[in-house]
Image (spheres, helix red, strand yellow):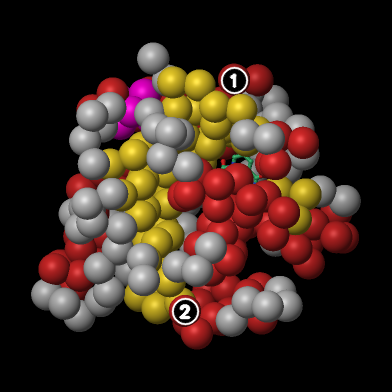
Amino acid sequence: METVLVVGATGNIGVSAVISALRSGRKVLAIVRNQTSADKLRTHIANIPSLSFDGITFVKADVTSETGVRGVVDQVRAGKLPGFQHVFSCVGGDYNAIPLTEITTEMLRRNMNLSFEANFCTSHFPWLGRETTWTSCTGAQGDIALMPVPAIPQGALFSFCTAASRENETTNVRFNEIYLAFRVEVDELAAQHGVTPASEFAGVYEQILGRPEIRSSRVRVESVADIEELKFKRKF
Ligand SMILES: NC(=O)c1ccc[n+]([C@@H]2O[C@H](COP(=O)([O-])OP(=O)(O)OC[C@H]3O[C@@H](n4cnc5c(N)ncnc54)[C@H](OP(=O)(O)O)[C@@H]3O)[C@@H](O)[C@H]2O)c1
């Protein structure tokens, strides 16, 4: 059975990726920062009928540090953690509308570290299967920048995704970027806030996993209808 490694597994988008993996009959290797975060993911999955968190292996690591992520790779190589064939990364920082004039250097560095560098670190994972996928989630904030704090790292992620798409155009790694243009939250919060639930958005990654023709592409998810009818286009 295939395994999906999810980096940022406890957030809105990460929970959605975990749901996609479990729903499509795969296992999950979830990187979490502590027990509280692991419990949060367990609760989200337990709230979804027909899914069980039995298929999830939790590994604690600090995704903000290069050595944290490398430690996970070392444990996989040593056979202490399950090997994985797919990687989904969606670590995220602050989600606010603080204007440029009030963004401190410390805030900028923290958000670049979380929303860009922690996702970039997945470039160094080993690819263990013959057919593998690697997926990153960006968003329309990177273009419209109504919220500069989440927008700026997304600009960097766009270029990163293009580079990853180019470098893997003909490898065994099917890289894709999901460009999400509306708000998705874990199901409980989505119901409170009137936004799209993670379990519905999960359909996008579920399709990417199962459709070999989607590679080196940006998958644009600009309306709820795009979750079913995927719109994808080569990044270059
Ligand atoms: N949600 C959307 O609608 C949406 C739309 C477009 C793009 N995106 C992009 O998708 C990415 C994820 O968004 P999201 O809504 O899922 O964010 P989120 O719910 O805030 O989740 C962020 C993830 O990053 C982890 N994280 C945050 N700070 C950390 C730290 N200091 N150390 C270790 N881990 C940390 C969180 O872990 P904990 O659970 O432990 O805090 C969580 O797994 C972001 O880059 C965002 O810009 C999201």
Reply above or below: 55 against 165. below
**Image quadrant occupied by the N terminus:** bottom left
Quarter placement of the C terminus: top left
Report the residue marked by disc 1.
143
Magenta span: chief secondary structure:
helix
Q: CA distance from mark 1 to mark 2?
A: 37 Å
Q: Disc 2 marks which residue?
A: 55
Q: Residue at x 44, y 27 (%)?
A: 217
- Magenta includes 162? yes
Q: Residue at x 31, y 49 (%)?
A: 132
- Magenta-highlighted residues: 161-165
On screen, residue 110 versus residue 149, left or right, reads left
Query: Which sits in the foreground, 140 or 79?
Result: 79
Q: Nearer the viewer, residue 118 or 212?
A: 212
* Left or right: residue 137 compared with residue 84: right
Question: Residue flagged by tag 1: what amino acid is it?
Answer: Asp
User: Which mark identifies residue 151?
Assistant: none
The picture places residue 175, in percent across and down from the top left corner, at 36, 37
Q: Position of residue 117 (x, y in %)?
A: 34, 42
Mark 1 closeness class: few <14, some 14–19, many ≥20 residues within 10 Å: few
Q: Amino acid at mark 2?
A: Gly
| Nearer to me, 99 or 10 | 10
Determine whether 119 is above or below 61 in the image: above
Find numbered disc 1 in the image and state the secondary structure of the residue it sits on.
helix
For mark 2, does the 10 Å Cα neighbourhood hold few (<14), some (14 to 19), or many (20 or more) residues?
A: some
Outermost residue, top side: 236
Element marked by disc 2:
helix
Tell me if residue 18 is in the magenta stretch.
Answer: no
- Residue drawn at point x = 22 percent, y = 51 percent: 130
Q: Pick out the residue farthest to the bottom.
A: 54
